[in-house]
Amino acid sequence: MIHNLNIKHEYFSAILNGKKQFELREQRPDRYFTNGDILRLMDETTGEVLHVIATYVLNDAMMGLQPNWCCMSIKVSTHGSGVKQ
């Protein structure tokens, strides 16, 4: 599944530079993340778009996450990705 998401500029840049390899998001009935999903991240400041793959999704309150939140390991997609204006 492809999820269209906005992201703050500082986080977008950190992903693009390889420093941020995770994403925290709320799980909702209309937007539920699973392994292999594509996140289409749009920089709120520049409008640039980056595609990343959720390689692992952690949904576990026992690990300190709030209910309905997940932490995803992400990897920049090499297929049809890149930064787009």
Image (cartoon, rainbow, N blue to C red):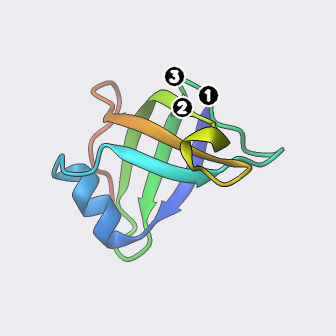
Task: Give the SS element for disc 1.
Answer: loop
Inspect the image, locate mark 1, and give the three-letter code of the amino acid beneath it: Thr
Q: Tell me if label 3 and label 1 are in contact, CB under 8 Å.
A: yes
Task: Please state which of residues 43 and 15 is positioned toward the viewer in this rendering.
Answer: 15
Residue at image coords 63%, 36%: 59
- Place residue 42 in its image quadrant: bottom left
User: Residue reaching furthest front?
Assistant: 62
Q: Give x and y (percent) for residue 65.
A: 60, 50
Inspect the image, locate mark 2, and give the three-letter code of the amino acid beneath it: Val
The residue tagged 1 is: 34
Q: Give x and y (percent) for residue 10.
A: 29, 70
Are there few (<14), some (14-19), or many (20+) residues within 10 Å of tag 1?
A: some
Residue at image coords 38%, 45%: 22
Task: Please state which of residues 1 and 26 is positioned toward the viewer in this rendering.
Answer: 26
**Residue 79 placement, left or right of 16:** right
Residue at image coords 48%, 46%: 40
CA gap between label 1 and label 2 equals 6 Å
Are there few (<14), some (14-19), or many (20+) residues within 10 Å of tag 2?
A: some
CA gap between label 3 and label 1 equals 6 Å
Total label count? 3
Q: Give x and y (percent) for residue 25.
A: 58, 52
Inspect the image, locate mark 3, and give the three-letter code of the amino acid beneath it: Gly
Q: Which labelled disc corresponds to residue 10?
A: none
Q: Quadrant of the C terminus?
A: bottom left
Q: Which labelled disc corresponds to residue 57?
A: 2
The residue tagged 3 is: 36
